[in-house]
Image (cartoon, grey):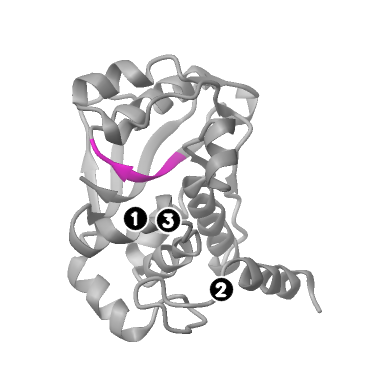
């Protein structure tokens, strides 16, 4: 058994190969019926932002945070259905134009969680997405892909009240000073894509990018599964 096949076998044990929406067995984690449903919900949007207010240039997202998408993300994040990340990434793969944009970044960074939250949940939902996107990029690129998932530069050093429980003003105050930068030499002149599950007010993404800008990267954009 090759290393790749062994890795996929382990993943199938940890994350059972079922459609993340209907729960039926499916090796792609997304059945054709549910894929068509997601296609009706998909936006594949790229929003440019005001650089005087934000520390990143663009926000890329697939869905609006509503209806079935909201339910899926809540299940993914809070109800121990971590395998749903593979449903999202496999659906993303089907949009060649959007996926090609993701291939243009050489550094992909997931929004980190605190060690306390990691112990409670057992996984970082953003890191699962980031790792699988990088895996798919390296496996599907015709040319040698240079992208990598970096998790030792942006660190969350405080456990705070969950942002979802706060209003916009409270979120901005709650998130300040939560992240620190390490190993910044890895990020100098890099094209960075910050990955998270949901974009609501943008407070978390902007605070992360503010810290990452200290490393003087070439550019920073943000990708989320959904936007509220």
Q: Is residue 204 above or below residue 120?
A: above
**Quadrant of image for the C terminus:** top left
What's the magenta bit mostly, secondary-structure-wise?
strand
Q: Which residue is mark 1?
A: 73
Secondary element under disc 1, as helix, strand or loop, is helix
C-alpha separation, residue under disc 3 versus residue under disc 2: 15 Å
C-alpha separation, residue under disc 1 versus residue under disc 2: 17 Å
* Foreground label between 3 and 2: 3
Task: Report the residue at 40% width, 43% height from top.
Answer: 196
Determine which quarter of the picture holds residue 120.
top right
Secondary element under disc 3, as helix, strand or loop, is loop
Left-right relation of 159 to 72: right
**Quadrant of image for the N terminus:** bottom right
Secondary element under disc 2, as helix, strand or loop, is loop
Q: Which residues are magenta?
A: 193-200
Q: Percent position (x, y) of residue 46?
A: 24, 48
Q: Is residue 181 above or below residue 224?
A: above
Compare marks 3 and 2 and give the one earlier in the sequence.
2
Q: Which residue is mark 3?
A: 79
User: Do labels 1 and 2 touch, CB within 8 Å?
Assistant: no
Is residue 197 on the magenta stretch? yes
Q: Which residue is mark 2?
A: 16
């Amino acid at each position: 058994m090759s290393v790749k096949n062994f890795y996929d076998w382990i993943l199938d044990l940890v994350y059972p190969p079922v459609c993340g929406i209907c729960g039926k067995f499916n090796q792609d984690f997304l059945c054709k019926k549910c894929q068509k449903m997601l296609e009706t919900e998909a936006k594949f949007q790229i929003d440019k932002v005001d650089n005087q207010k934000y520390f990143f240039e663009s926000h890329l997202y697939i869905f609006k945070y509503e209806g079935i998408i909201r339910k899926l993300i809540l299940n993914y994040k809070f109800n121990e259905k971590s395998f749903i990340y593979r449903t999202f990434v496999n659906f993303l793969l089907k949009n060649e134009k959007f996926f090609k944009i993701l291939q243009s970044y050489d550094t992909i960074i997931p929004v980190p969680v605190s060690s306390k939250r990691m112990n409670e949940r057992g996984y970082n939902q953003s890191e699962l997405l980031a790792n699988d996107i990088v895996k798919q990029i390296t496996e599907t690129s015709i040319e040698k892909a240079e992208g990598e998932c970096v998790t030792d530069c942006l660190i969350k050093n405080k456990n705070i009240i969950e942002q979802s429980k706060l209003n916009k003003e409270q979120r901005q105050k709650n998130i300040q000073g939560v992240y620190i930068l390490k190993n910044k030499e890895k990020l100098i002149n890099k094209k960075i894509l910050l990955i998270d599950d949901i974009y609501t007010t943008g407070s978390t993404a902007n605070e992360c990018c503010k810290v990452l800008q200290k490393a003087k990267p070439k550019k920073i954009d943000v990708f989320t599964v959904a936007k509220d």
